[in-house]
Structures are given as structure tokens and as C-alpha cells.
Image: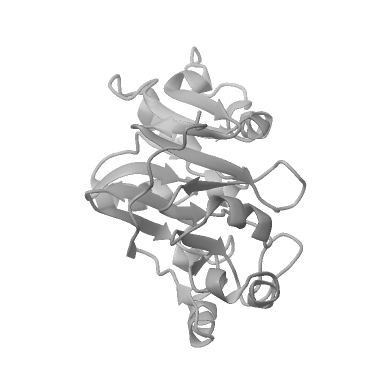
Amino acid sequence: MNWHLHFLGTGAAHAVELGSSAVVLERDGEPLLLVDCGPDTLDRYRAAYGDLPRAIYITHTHMDHIGGMERLFTRAWFDEALRGNIRVFCHAALVPWLQARVADYPGVLAEGGANYWEAFRLVPCTRGFWLDGLWFDVFATRHHRPDTAFGLALAGSFAYTGDTRPIPEALGRYAGGEALVAHDCGLHGNPSHTGVADVEREYDAALRARLLLYHYGSAADGAALAERGYRVAVTGQRIALPAPLPPRADAG
């Protein structure tokens, strides 16, 4: 069985030419889980797979990561095969923020008579969630205020940070062994995002060797990160992953 992360976009919020940061976990070439759904993500997903996602994980509720949810609602609502069958996984702490940002606006349809979440199957979680027999760990990251952003990991295979400052303790727990670590990183850090100097200060050489950087500010910034010896994700790229480990006894 083959596993890949397919990067639909790799850019920071202002780097529109790189696409909104989002990835798809693929199993044997088929999409299993979309991570984040920015303004251009659905177009990129449909171009790659010819269909809409059936499962989405939301890392946090900034619009460059959820801006495609309104369009997805419309497509799902008017398709009887999809309505209520697209699973949206997110940490329970994000549900009020997600509600406020995408579901609270009155009159979700001009005709009325529609509740936003009836188009989906919202699955709140805390420690993680099950999908197709796999247990995905969910962990807190450091992005703006506490409990507003959460990464995702599949044991032995990968960890995806979402937007974050350095999180060595979390990665030490959820990204052990040979797991790939897809990490927010630009040339320069700020109070909400990691910069390359932060990576070199906070992470040891063994972990840095497993990093794959995304959410950078421009193609030139990505090239500069690569010149410093880092692996840098490119929009449209598929990255091979180690096979996931069996779910732990305490999963779920």
C-alpha cells in the first residue's frame, strides 16, 4: 500500500500564487482526507480528483484555511448523494469559531429553509478521530491565542502542523520514528508563524532532517529555504510517506 501527501497549495495567506496551504492524504493514489479548505482549495482538489472531498480536517479558522467552505456547502446541499455525507473533523474547541465564521450568517440560502451543518457531518474531536480504520492524533499548536489551532498526525507516517510557532514537545510525542513533519515555516518568523531561525533554535538536527516546509511567503522565499538545506514543499507535489503504524491500544 502506498501513502502520499499531495500539496494542493503551499503559500502563506498573502502568497496567492502558491495556493492556500492544504494537503490531501492519499492511499494507493486515492484521496482519503483533505486538510484545510481555503478559497482556492476546491478548484485544485477537483482538478486533481474530478470530485469533491468526502472527509476534511480543519486545523484552524483563518479564512485562508476555511474560505472554501461556503462553496462546498452549496455544492453539497444541492447534491442528494453528498448532502450530509461529507465529514468535517475539527477539534471541539474550534466549533464555536467555525460556527461564527462560516455558519452563522442568516439566510445561508437565498430561498431559506437550509441549516448550514445539515450539508455536512460535523465530527468534533479532542484527542483525535477514526477514519477508515485509521486513528489520527490531534494536538494543540501555537498560533495566536491558545486552543485555536490544532495539528494532525498519523503515527509512524506524518505530522502536519497547520499554522504554528515551534512545538518541539508536541512533535516529540506525535511525530516519532521516521514520520515526515510538514511544518509551517517562512524565512522570517513572527508571533504566530515559524521562521527558519526558530527552526534552527528549537529543533535538533534529527528532527530538522525530517521537516518538509510549507506556508512560506513566495516562490523566492521557498528557494531561499531550500538553499539553506531544507526540504520545501512545492504546490502540486506528492510526497511519499512511510506506512502508518497500527493504531495504539489507547486510541479512541
Residue 113 visible somewhere in the drawing = yes
**Which residue is found at the position 75% from the left and 52% from the top?**
144
| Residue that extends furthest to the front in the rendered view of this protein | 249
- Measured as percent of width and height from the top left, residue 65 is found at 54, 48
Judge by depth and name the residue closer to the eye, 177 or 96: 177
Q: Quadrant of residue 7?
A: bottom left
Q: Residue furthest top?
A: 113
Residue in front for this viewpoint, 113 or 189: 189
Kindly identify the residue that appears in the image at 27 percent across and 22 percent down: 81
In this picture, residue 248 sits left or right of residue 163 = left
Vertical relation: 51 (above or below) 211: above
The furthest residue to the bottom: 227
Question: Which color scheme is applied?
Answer: one colour
x then y, percent, for residue 72 = 42, 35
Residue at image point 59% right, 56% down: 171
Looking at the image, is 35 positioned above or below residue 238? above
Q: Nearer the viewer, residue 86 or 80?
A: 86
Image check: 198 left or right of 35?
A: right
Q: Is residue 195 above or below residue 174?
A: below
**Quadrant in the picture for residue 98:** top right
Q: How many marks?
A: 0
Vertical position of residue 12 compared to residue 45: above or below = below
Q: In terms of image quadrants, where is residue 206?
A: bottom right
Residue 73 in sight from this viewpoint: no
Q: Could you tell me which residue is drawn at 52 percent across and 22 percent down?
A: 116
Q: Left or right: where does residue 192 sit relative to residue 16?
A: right
Q: Nearer the viewer, residue 78 or 34?
A: 34
Residue 6 in picture, x, y percent from top left:
35, 57
